[in-house]
């Protein structure tokens, strides 16, 4: 439906018919303390023509910068075939496949996606799908608490993406779940395992294990997973799906593997698109599948022995059972999942590994060049994937502003999220950056930081 058809007269007639005074009265059972309150900051409604004019101007503002920002949203090459196929009418307009007899194509795509994600994560089952990576992590926390039964306390490392941590707190704070912060090692940038030892006598439901973490640093996932299991807790893996095409998958972490793996599927064929949409993925061990929210597609045979696909383990009513349901999730990002399925099928396992390796190699090249700039050095010594934190002697925001003037988005300043890292700059390199791009960024940083006083040695290092 491209527009809302109800006039004010229609709404008044509806309210009079059911005997209430206002729309708000329909929600009288919701306690006042849980209501969002006044949305006075929202602008008034606009006519359709004005909306189209506004959106065209916004789209035109997306200038073709060379982008070195990552932080959960990554610029990757997407083969042209991905969205050429995904936007065909059969996929683009298909609705949630409740009626299996009319939805075999959509169901098969979702089944193929699930199969690929189980192979990628090395876990038994995946769903299809969740809203985004942050809400997927929140769902994993809820799922772990349900499965654990005796504890409602979850360990949340400070090295987890700040937006993910805020989202999880928002979703679980009214459900009696306590999120306990776990510090990061100030030298290496991963979880401070010594701080875990101080919690060994506590009853913990789960430990979140990011890989790589927000700083781009690789966590000691085997040790963290085994620590969680040794203390009766579940290990919740928060992973970049491209990274685990190259690194050890969550299902093989430690002695017994992670219990649940979640993340954002955006690196798998989803463009940045000025902020979304993305989608969240979730995988888990088979014995936890009945606690998993969202949809699961199964493959079976009909009476004639022909293969077919259907939603399994839950009926449509699962999504309207309110408190008896496993989650309030009642939709998915099916189109995004379709694009990721096509993307993974085109690249294959080897293509994903090569892409991940190229990202890592590009970052190492950039770090080598930037480390030659006086006043720039790496902040953490831990191994990284395709992001890293740099310490800059110059004010980070001034540096980023100067780079932007040269058509370069030079990274993300960390002061807002980590005040103790006020001089920190998070930079990211993907396979979309060639050697000229890397040299250009390093050369501009050298020029800006040096303000005309750059050393000949630094210039020679970057040039070579």
Image (tube, rainbow, N blue to C red):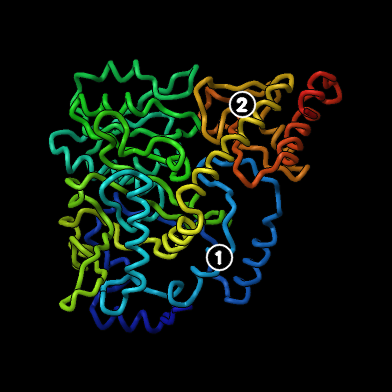
Q: Which quadrant of the figure contains the N terminus?
A: bottom left
Establish if 422 lies above or below 411: above
For the point 64% across and 47% down, which residue is it?
A: 432
Please give the label number shown on residue 450: none
Disc 1: which residue: 81
In percent of width and height, residue 13 lies at 33, 84
Q: Nearer the viewer, residue 364 or 410?
A: 364
Left or right: 439 in relation to 340: right
Please say if the residues under marks 2 and 1 sit with CB atoms less than 8 Å apart. no
Q: Which image quadrant is residue 443 in?
A: top right
Left or right: 449 in relation to 327: right
The crowd level at tag 2 (other Cα within 10 Å; few <14, some 14-19, many 20+) is many
Disc 2: which residue: 390
Q: Secondary structure at mark 1?
A: helix
Q: Secondary structure at mark 2?
A: strand
Q: Nearer the viewer, residue 271 or 413?
A: 271
For the point 52% across and 29% down, which residue is it?
A: 384
For the point 32% across and 54% down, which residue is it?
A: 35
Of badges 2 and 1, nearer the viewer stands: 1
Q: Nearer the viewer, residue 106 or 390?
A: 106
Q: Which quadrant of the figure contains the C terminus?
A: top right
Left or right: 20 in relation to 247: left
From mark 2 to mark 1, how far is it between C-alphas?
Answer: 37 Å
For this orientation, the residue located farthest to the left is 150
In percent of width and height, residue 300 lies at 21, 67
Left or right: 116 in relation to 406: left
The crowd level at tag 1 (other Cα within 10 Å; few <14, some 14-19, many 20+) is few
């Amino acid at each position: 439906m491209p527009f809302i058809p109800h006039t004010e007269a229609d709404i008044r007639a509806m309210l009079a018919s059911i005997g209430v005074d206002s729309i708000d009265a329909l929600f009288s059972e919701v306690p006042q303390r849980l209501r969002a309150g006044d949305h006075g900051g929202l602008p008034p409604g606009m006519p359709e023509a004005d909306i189209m004019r506004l959106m065209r101007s916004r789209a035109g503002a997306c200038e073709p910068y060379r982008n070195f920002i990552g932080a959960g949203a990554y610029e990757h090459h997407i083969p042209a075939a991905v969205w050429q196929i995904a936007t065909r009418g059969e996929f683009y307009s298909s609705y949630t496949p409740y009626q299996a007899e009319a939805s075999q194509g959509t169901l098969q795509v979702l089944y193929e996606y699930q199969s690929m994600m189980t192979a990628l994560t090395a876990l038994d089952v995946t769903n299809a799908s969740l809203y985004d990576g942050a809400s997927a992590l929140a769902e994993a926390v809820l799922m772990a608490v349900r499965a654990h039964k005796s504890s409602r306390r979850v360990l949340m490392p400070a090295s987890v993406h700040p937006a993910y941590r805020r989202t999880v707190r928002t979703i679980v704070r009214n459900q009696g779940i306590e999120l306990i912060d776990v510090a990061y090692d100030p030298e290496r940038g991963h979880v401070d395992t010594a701080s875990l030892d101080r919690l060994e006598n506590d009853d913990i439901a789960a430990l979140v294990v990011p890989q790589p973490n927000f700083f781009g640093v690789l966590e000691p996932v085997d040790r963290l997973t085994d620590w969680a299991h040794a203390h009766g807790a579940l290990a919740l893996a928060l992973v970049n799906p491209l990274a685990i095409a190259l690194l050890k998958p969550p299902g093989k972490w430690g002695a017994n593997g992670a219990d649940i793996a979640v993340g954002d599927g955006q690196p798998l064929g989803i463009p940045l698109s000025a902020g979304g949409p993305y989608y969240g993925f979730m995988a888990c061990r088979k014995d936890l599948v009945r606690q998993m929210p969202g949809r699961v597609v199964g493959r079976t045979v009909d009476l004639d022995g022909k293969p077919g696909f259907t939603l399994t383990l839950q009926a449509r009513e699962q999504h309207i059972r309110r408190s008896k349901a496993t989650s309030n999730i009642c939709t998915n990002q099916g189109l995004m999942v379709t694009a990721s399925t096509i993307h993974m099928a085109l690249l294959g396992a080897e293509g994903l590994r090569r892409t991940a390796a190229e990202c890592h190699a590009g970052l190492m090249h950039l770090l080598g060049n930037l480390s030659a700039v006086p006043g720039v050095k790496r902040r953490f010594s831990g191994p990284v994937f395709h992001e890293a934190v740099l310490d800059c002697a110059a004010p980070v925001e001034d540096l980023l502003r100067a780079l932007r003037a040269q058509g370069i988005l030079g990274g993300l300043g960390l002061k807002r999220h980590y005040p103790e890292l006020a001089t920190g700059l998070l930079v990211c390199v993907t396979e979309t950056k060639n050697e000229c791009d890397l040299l250009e960024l390093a050369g501009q940083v050298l020029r800006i930081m040096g303000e005309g006083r750059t050393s000949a040695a630094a210039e020679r290092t970057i040039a070579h």
